[in-house]
Amino acid sequence: MAPRAVAGALAAGWGVLAVAHVVVVVGLRQLLRLPVPAGLAALVDVNGEGNLPAWYQTALLLACAAGLAALGSVRPRSAPRGPVPDRWAWRGLAAVFLYLALDEALQVHERTVPPLRRLAFGGTPLEDVGWVVPAAGLCVALGVALLRFLAHLPGPTRRAFAAAGALYLAGALGLEVAGGWWSFRFGYDSPGFGLLAAAEETLEAAGLLVFLHALLGYAAAAWGPVLVTISDRPAPPAGGTDRAERNERNTTTPGDPM
């Protein structure tokens, strides 16, 4: 499939999940106060854990990590013999996305909330989202460390990576702070917080989809078409044809029509 088709299909999948959250969690439960089954609300709540939105974003992060790791391991067609160009930058980014996937699945960053609340943010709108402060510092450091790597990328890929990062951080940090302020003032079970959570997660998903689309486009330009074959037979020697398959095609079973 073309990168645009892949990204479009994935975007449609997230759209279904976001609409389900707005309808079930925000509309039926928070606005109308209807008795929505707890299991259904938990399944589609974008601010929940171990549910469909969380698994979806984890899968997106893992797909990005896999693509980055591959680009750090396979030499492009136009590259001279030798190590893969910028291989450690590709692999380092793959490690970052792998960590983000684990964090999305296991909510690692939330374990920093209690100590940060005790040390600095208790009684403030940041008491439940204080982790964004050290996270913002790490993002700045990562961006500075990647400047040289980004400068080596083609212009469209570089701009797409930058746009993806801006979208993702606008949700993961910017709207996270807005949601922390809203929950501090009005509580978590308010329609405003539900909408902010939907906007936050949608911006994160949009950033990941833009990044994955750019990654697939870059990989296609670097490697050309990639064919994946699944077979229970060993691969034939390079440049040759599988002798067993050739013999099988050339052998006529007695009784078969000629």
Image (cartoon, helix red, strand yellow):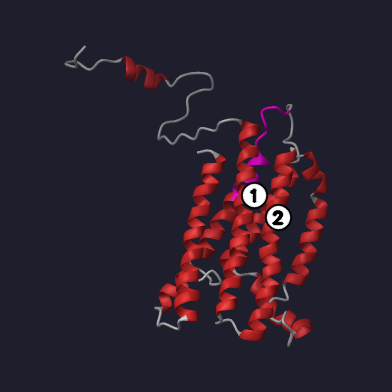
What's the residue at 70%, 63% (across, down)?
A: 170
Q: In which quarter of the image is residue 28?
A: bottom left
Give percent across and percent down for residue 242.
43, 22
Give percent across and percent down for residue 221.
64, 33
Q: State if disc 2 and disc 1 touch (CB < 8 Å).
A: yes
Magenta stretch, residue numbers: 64-79
Residue on which disc 2 sits: 165
- Residue 180 shown in magenta: no
Count residues near mark 1 (Cα–Cα under 10 Å), then give few for <14, some for 14-19, many for 20+: many
Q: 226 or 20: nearer the eye?
A: 20
Tell me if I can see residue 52 in this picture.
no
User: Which amino acid type is marked by label 1?
Assistant: Phe
Q: Quadrant of residue 73?
A: top right
Does residue 95 appear left or right of residue 24 in this picture?
right
Tell me if I can see residue 97 in this picture.
yes
Q: Which residue lies furthest to the top in this view?
A: 258
- Mark 2 residue element: helix
- Mark 1 residue element: helix
- Residue 76 shown in magenta: yes
Give percent across and percent down for residue 19.
48, 65
Q: In this view, does 20 lie above or below 187?
A: above
User: Which amino acid type is marked by label 2?
Assistant: Gly
What's the residue at 45%, 73% (across, down)?
A: 24
Spatial CA span between label 1 and label 2: 8 Å
Give percent across and percent down for residue 94.
67, 50
